[in-house]
Amino acid sequence: MRGFSQRLPVDWLRKHLAAEAKHYLVPTLVHQLRHRPEVSPQWRCQLLLTVTTGEQIWGLLDVRPDTFDRLPETLDAPSKKDIVSRIERGVTRRAWSERMHPEEMPHN
């Protein structure tokens, strides 16, 4: 899995996500936080996000299982496979930002 340590800053999401678009969340693995048992386990999920340019990019998000369980199921099996396929072909949030908004990228 590419970019596994990627994080999605809230300010970035507010600025660049297409608010009216559908965004998808796909649980990928269980993430145990032994150093923070009060918030463990979490599900590491892949996201398929639509940005303001209309492009779809992917990112990662850790979600508590009880929060994920409250989300309504809206997709059938073929649709889920399509989402995963688009994630696998997609550009990461970081790569998209570097191309579209290099001035926002941290300089090391």
Image (spheres, rainbow, N blue to C red):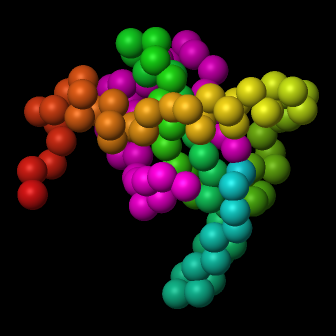
Q: Position of residue 49 (x, y in %)?
A: 53, 29
In the figure, residue 13 lies in which quadrant? top left
In the image, residue 90 sits, relative to residue 27, either above or below, namely above
Q: Position of residue 61 (x, y in %)?
A: 55, 51
Q: Position of residue 22 (x, y in %)?
A: 63, 20
Q: Residue furthest front?
A: 89
Q: Is residue 35 left or right of residue 11?
A: right
Quarter of the image with the N terminus is: bottom right
Closest to the observer, 96 or 49: 96
Closest to the observer, 22 or 36: 22
Residue 74 in sight in this render? no
Q: Which residues are magenta?
A: 1-26
* Residue 43 inside the magenta-drawn segment: no
Residue at 46% of width from left, 18% of height from top? 55
* Residue 23 inside the magenta-drawn segment: yes
Q: Residue furthest bottom?
A: 35
In the image, residue 18 sits, relative to residue 9, either above or below, namely above
Q: Position of residue 18 (x, y in %)?
A: 47, 17
